[in-house]
Image (spheres, rainbow, N blue to C red):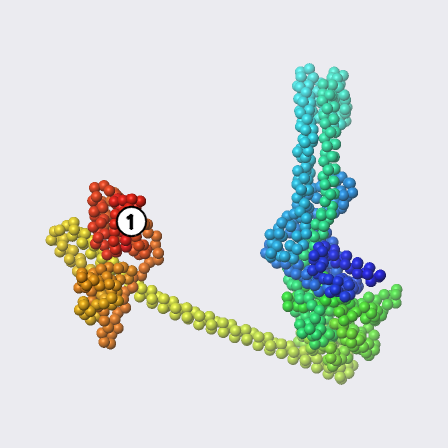
Amino acid sequence: ILGFRIYIIHVRVYSYRFPMDARILHAISLADCPESRYDMGVDEKSLEILEFPHIREIIAGFTSFAPGRELALRLQPLTNAEGISHLLRQSAEARQLLTQHPGFTIGGAADVRQAVQMAARGKVLEIPDLLAVQKTVGAFNQLRSSLAKLAKEFPLLWEIAAGITEITDLEREIGHCLSPNGEILDHASPALHKIRKQLGEVRRKMLDRLQAVMASPRWRKIIQEPIVTERETRYVIPVKAEHRREIKGIVHDVSNTGATVFVEPWLTVDLGNSLRELVMAERREVERIMRTLSSRVGEYEAPILRNTDLVAELDLALAKARFALRFKSTEPAITNVSTDGKARTLRLIEARHPLLGEKAVPLSVEIGRDFSILVITGPNTGGKTVALKTIGLLCLMAQAGIPIPASADSQLPVCDGIFADIGDEQSIEQTLSTFSWHMGNIVRFLAQANEHSLVLLDELGTSTDPAEGSALARSVLLHLLSRNIMTVATTHLGDLKAFAHTTPGLQNASLDFDPVTLMPTYHLTVGVPGGSNALAIASLLGLPIEIINSARNMLGQGTQEMESLLTDLTAEKQRLEALHLQMARETEALQDQKLELANGIARARAEAQKALGEERRAVQEIRDKAVKDMAELHRSIRDTLGELRRERSKEKVEAARKVLSAAHQKLRSALPPPATVAVPPERITVGDRVWLRETSLPATVLAISETTQEVQLQAGQVKLTVSLDAIEKLSKPEGKTPPEPVHVARPLARTVPMDLDLRGKRAEEIEPLLDSYLNNAAMANMGQARIIHGFGTGTVRQIVRELLSEHPLVKAFRSGERREGGDGATVVML
């Protein structure tokens, strides 16, 4: 029965931390927990020694919600690996959330639990309480809505927020009745609106009557001041005391000097009575509204309290995340077995004590793989106690779901108990010596600890006779080793250093001491024992040298040799570490050189590619220039032919011939003459490469007409028909390579309209416009275009069709169909 009751208590504690049933089942099942308990068998004294309550206070300081602060202050380590990992994953998600959305908060929620519980029991809440409930419910709704949008990114936080019940109607009802500054709004109820409207009308009538009385010449001389004031909720006017009998009414007050009496005239008494009745009616209606709103709040007691618990849980997760960002903490891996499956492993990498701030020296240690007991030695003030506290505190933090200031590669076991014997609590009243206090702790630990516990022992075997203390310490360590209890102990006893070195399952570690500066480095090295360096430290603290020398002479030869050996080992270890550091730097430098060399090769390749590209661009520019010259040649030819049509004089013909000859000469100088061997026209066949004699352009034979003695050629993107006499076949002379054909660089696709409108143009404008348009259309790979020339006298149509019949880019043309403009347009096939 007792065991069953304990189980129920633990389940309730855990379910409070995980209020959703689904998460309880997800966290752990009864079959997975043979011990039937979730919380650690906490040794409260050990928690205080390891300063875990201080960590809870720091976490509480990062909360923004009173119930969340309460959860933080009640944090306790758990013993279920699944539940611990769940909490740490929540913290990791919250840290990621704050990194991506730094301004994310739970909103302006307040702790309204007491007000809601009182409302559920019939109490009428005050306006500030109702406004706090409205604001809190709104914050809950907004928090749920915000996390719903981030559900895929942060599923564990949404798992909590999904349980929040949206209470929009209560928020809306309170907002309908109360203004943000705490006033009852007129439209809170129809009755209140009517009463306040009547109040305004009656008050206005009363003020008008009183103002009329004071403005009357009859009463002006008896009025002390022409103002209307209020006494005992009645409107009155100030009257001079000596004229009191001259006005009928009720005296409600007299001034301190007695010179003024405040009178309510009979003329306004009825209105005053009506006003008083309306004020009382308003008060009753306001009380009714407040009672109704309070009752509505009480109806939502269960969902509001549940929402409060869930939001407190979210607030705690965010507080842990803020702690992690502030203290550069991460979530360690939680496991009960090592990676090889043989034993539990405690591995801390670059761990720092969170309460030491920037002064903390990183600590790296691993226990459980090759040994289960670590014996730390080293100088006084060297940091042994800090190392113990760091190991114990970080284990407690991790099991409470708090990120630890250590590398993310750290791994911690689940301990069902962490027992720390650190410090010295002597008691004169209880005749408790230092040794007795330590032994009392060890006795208690041995009675409670098991193979899933962690024991931390500071200065083991001290505070008594060294020989007996050493024997007792070795016996305690052997007992812990036989029970496979993970233990970390510190000592100054030389026997324990040798014992740890020779006993399997135990390992030495030392807090380093700089033999040059005689100062501790606070750096932990596993595998090497450390010396106490008591004489060196005493000398550094100012003890006279003669005392130091005397003490050194009193030391046994073996002790001196051991201390000298440890000093030499420390120096050798530091030298090896320096050498290792130098090798690491040289390796890093070699890696940098290798990277720089690779970058140099990449840059050389890039420069070579750039040079090749520039060479290609230069060749392309030469070819483009040749094409441009050819285009100018064709333009000159067309201009000359057009001029010849218009002007038939011999002078013009001669000038045209000169221009044509100059253009031909310019083209021949721009392009190297092809290495050709002329062959009779009858030997040219389809597919042969030929040259146009007049333009020196290369082309490919597409078809040959035997009847007309004409051939169809493909020159770049242009198809044309010429006679056999106008071409020469290319053939490869012996020992020479025919020149590469000139490629016309086509520009990127351009936008060319499907129509060219020539209506209204003069005759001399038509040819250049039409030629330019056809060139652009061909370069844009258009297969068809429409020339709009209109009907008119037919002159423009005639000129257009004559030019189209002779143009090398035109395959055919026809009059437009009815939908294309009829005979007022010409459709061209390119």
Displayed quadrant of residue 442: bottom right
Q: Residue at x 71, y 55 (%)?
A: 20
Camera-side residue: 183 or 811? 811
**Is 497 left or right of 776, judged from the image as shown?**
right
Q: Secondary structure at mark 1?
A: strand
Q: Residue at x 21, y 68 (%)?
A: 684
Q: Quadrant of the C terminus?
A: bottom left
Residue 532: x percent and y percent?
Answer: 74, 76
Q: Is residue 726 visible?
A: no
**Is 709 left or right of 610, judged from the image as shown?**
left
Displayed quadrant of residue 99: bottom right
**Is 413 left or right of 444, judged from the image as shown?**
left
Residue 741: x percent and y percent?
Answer: 27, 66
Residue at the left extreme? Answer: 650
Above/below status of 686 relative to 120 = below
Specify the amino acid type for callout 1.
Answer: Arg
Mark 1 residue crowding within 10 angstroms, few (<14) / some (14–19) / many (20+): many
Camera-side residue: 798 or 394? 798
Residue holding disc 1: 786
Camera-side residue: 727 or 448? 727
Camera-side residue: 656 or 234? 656
Residue at the front extreme? Answer: 707
Above/below status of 659 relative to 794 = below
Residue 664: x percent and y percent?
Answer: 19, 61
Q: Residue at x 74, y 81 (%)?
A: 502
